[in-house]
Image (cartoon, coloured by chain):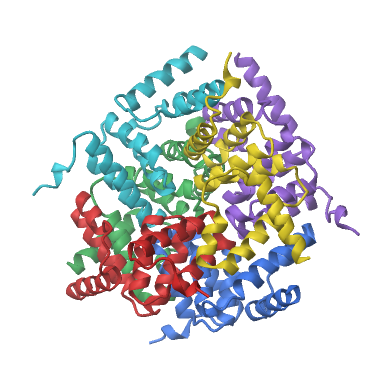
Chain colours: A blue, B red, C cyan, D green, E yellow, F purple
Amino acid sequence: MADARIEKTQRTASLYFKGVTDERPYELWREFDPEMAKALSLFVTGDLYAREKLPHTTRQLVSVGALTVLNRPEELRLHIQAALNVGCLPEEIAEAIFQTIPYGGVPTVNTALKTFRQVLIDRDEWPLTALAP
Amino acid sequence: MADARIEKTQRTASLYFKGVTDERPYELWREFDPEMAKALSLFVTGDLYAREKLPHTTRQLVSVGALTVLNRPEELRLHIQAALNVGCLPEEIAEAIFQTIPYGGVPTVNTALKTFRQVLIDRDEWPLTALAP
Amino acid sequence: MADARIEKTQRTASLYFKGVTDERPYELWREFDPEMAKALSLFVTGDLYAREKLPHTTRQLVSVGALTVLNRPEELRLHIQAALNVGCLPEEIAEAIFQTIPYGGVPTVNTALKTFRQVLIDRDEWPLTALAP
Amino acid sequence: MADARIEKTQRTASLYFKGVTDERPYELWREFDPEMAKALSLFVTGDLYAREKLPHTTRQLVSVGALTVLNRPEELRLHIQAALNVGCLPEEIAEAIFQTIPYGGVPTVNTALKTFRQVLIDRDEWPLTALAP
Amino acid sequence: MADARIEKTQRTASLYFKGVTDERPYELWREFDPEMAKALSLFVTGDLYAREKLPHTTRQLVSVGALTVLNRPEELRLHIQAALNVGCLPEEIAEAIFQTIPYGGVPTVNTALKTFRQVLIDRDEWPLTALAP
Amino acid sequence: MADARIEKTQRTASLYFKGVTDERPYELWREFDPEMAKALSLFVTGDLYAREKLPHTTRQLVSVGALTVLNRPEELRLHIQAALNVGCLPEEIAEAIFQTIPYGGVPTVNTALKTFRQVLIDRDEWPLTALAP
């Protein structure tokens, strides 16, 4: 079973974070504590993200909404990239962010939109063409 | 256009909160300020929730995740009911809640699960049969 | 100077919390640590609340807004009573709460309004007559 | 009525943000979704900020306090400028920030004071002369 | 290795929560998802709490401080009991709570103290005798 | 007694922040309000931090945990330095940060670890040698 956990973890990490050049949390944890890095990575990516109870697109939009209201732009940046990698449209990601206005307020939405805009700029996908008339 | 806003607002409110017996925020706002109650309701339900950029099921799961990490059990209770009303499965709602563990931590997940359990008890849908072997 | 601090603290506490029957934080702190209770009370009420840089009405509306977005209904309940005691109108308190919608979102506003409504009920000042046409 | 909403929105935005050179949230929202940008702007600035239930000076001090405890320095920067534009004294703004110490703690007060200091530096109004003996 | 994780998890859970009659989070998780309940429990209690990098007393005081500022009284209640079970003195727990005043503010300290007082009442250890002159 | 407060405050500030080159909050407060700067400093450092109810090492680890979950990296930076100054080992500080994973989630842990790494780099104590095999 231990091997299956590692395999699920690596497969899901590849799916989500392929091409991502940001410092990866796993690297950071390992610099302080390799054992904790391994346990945390296996739990979060292997035991949780790899589950098949929700499509990856929906799962990532839930992450985007939660990270928006918590105001965690670095982690949000990772999951916006994961959302794009699993097939979410930019319009869907923006809508998940806007949907949080009544819950977490407007300033966290602004931070999330700026984070999203920077991801799109870095991917050379900005401005959004869907908005062209 | 004003009429269209009102119509969209009422139609979306009916879709989401049909059968919900909790005190509705609109009623609370109106007791303090009828004009603000109207403006806020038209904005949140008419200008935001009624948009078609995301399926209502996905939109509600985003709300569930955001309200979980913010620890807002009363509003979460409303949106868990909305999620069930638009067709989310209990397993999907539970998964949206669990998905927030790495972002908002475990205690807010516990509060959300207890809120969800109470909604299911109130609807006579508890315990979850999908878990039976 | 120590006597002046104590006098300012007692005078301001009387002004704010006259007639309040809720458990007072000072009593709670004292049950655990009388020395800390004294130091904390002198700092918060004597060194801060007693300052004359803002009118007490404005100071309390700032407190109401901050406690609304932080979702601290017990402390909010104390400061809504203080706001009424120093002369804020109910409409002004409600407006300070509504003003936080874009910053902290709607669910914390709902909790604050329910807290405010209960204070008004306890004071036999509910419903608000200013709303009558 | 729609025209009146637009007029109120524009008039209030001019009053608050005249001379502000920061990126304006409305511009950011519009890059992602012009329809949402319009609806959100009309609600926040037209339906809420334009109300006459509180003087603009008091309203802005409530915003300053709420944004301090929420730790939203970019939005706080906008509302500190709005507070100065509607006539709040620097000492009053500082006091609204200090007033939040017991509610949101000291680190958010520090961030707010640094944000405020930068606004004053940008306006060539630093250091505060009122403190000169 | 899997057996060692389970053993560490059970041993640490027994140490921390012996005699605790509150609903245990593991039971709640299991009602919704037995697989997630197991994975989460093994990670939190086995991979994290069981580590020997800090004495259990210090570890629990860190938990008490973090749960105080986050305002999570149900989880705090569990960890106050764990702190007492591993040998923390009531005065040390109260001090860990007071120490958070400058970071999270006073209202969360009040909630934590009320939670702590209730634990002591439930254990028939209230009032604190150490305060007697 | 006033002199004793000042003496305790200065002695504790020296113990905690010796060699720290960051802007000190006291300096910031004083630029806005010397009277408040003095009152706040005497309360936080003199009336609270100087107490002997917990060893300074434990007290600082509680601060580290609380500031991690609140996501206050500037204040955290100060208290990580204080923790090192009073004798906490780097491994203990890292463990206090990791201990908050279940309460405040992973992104705040990442921010705290990056803050800690920068402190160690600034002190020329990075990478941690304890991790070398």
Q: Establish if C125 lies above or below B100.
A: above
Residue C44: image x %, image y %? 47, 29
Residue at the image point whose x is 31% and y is 59% from the top = D45
Residue C121: image x %, image y %? 22, 38
Residue at the image point whose x is 51% and y is 35% from the top = E122
In the shown orientation, is residue F46 left or right of residue D3? right
Q: Residue furthest left?
A: C133
In the shown orientation, is residue E74 left or right of residue E62? left
Q: Residue furthest bottom?
A: A133
Residue A91: image x %, image y %? 45, 79
Q: Establish if F120 lies above or below D13.
A: above
Q: Residue furthest right?
A: F133
Q: Which sits in the foreground, B57 or A93? A: B57
The count of marks equals 0
Residue at the image point whose x is 60% and y is 25% from the top = F47
Q: Which sits in the foreground, A29 or D130? A: A29
In the shown orientation, is residue C42 left or right of residue C113? right
Is any atom of residue E125 visible in this view?
A: yes
Is any atom of residue D114 visible in this view?
A: no
Q: Establish if B74 lies above or below E117.
A: below
Quarter in which the N terminus of chain F is drawn = top right
Residue at the image point whose x is 57% and y is 16% from the top = E132
Image-quadrant location for residue D48: bottom left
Residue B26: image x %, image y %? 24, 59
Quarter in which the C terminus of chain F is drawn = bottom right
In the shown orientation, is residue E13 left or right of residue A2? left
Image-quadrant location for residue A131: bottom left
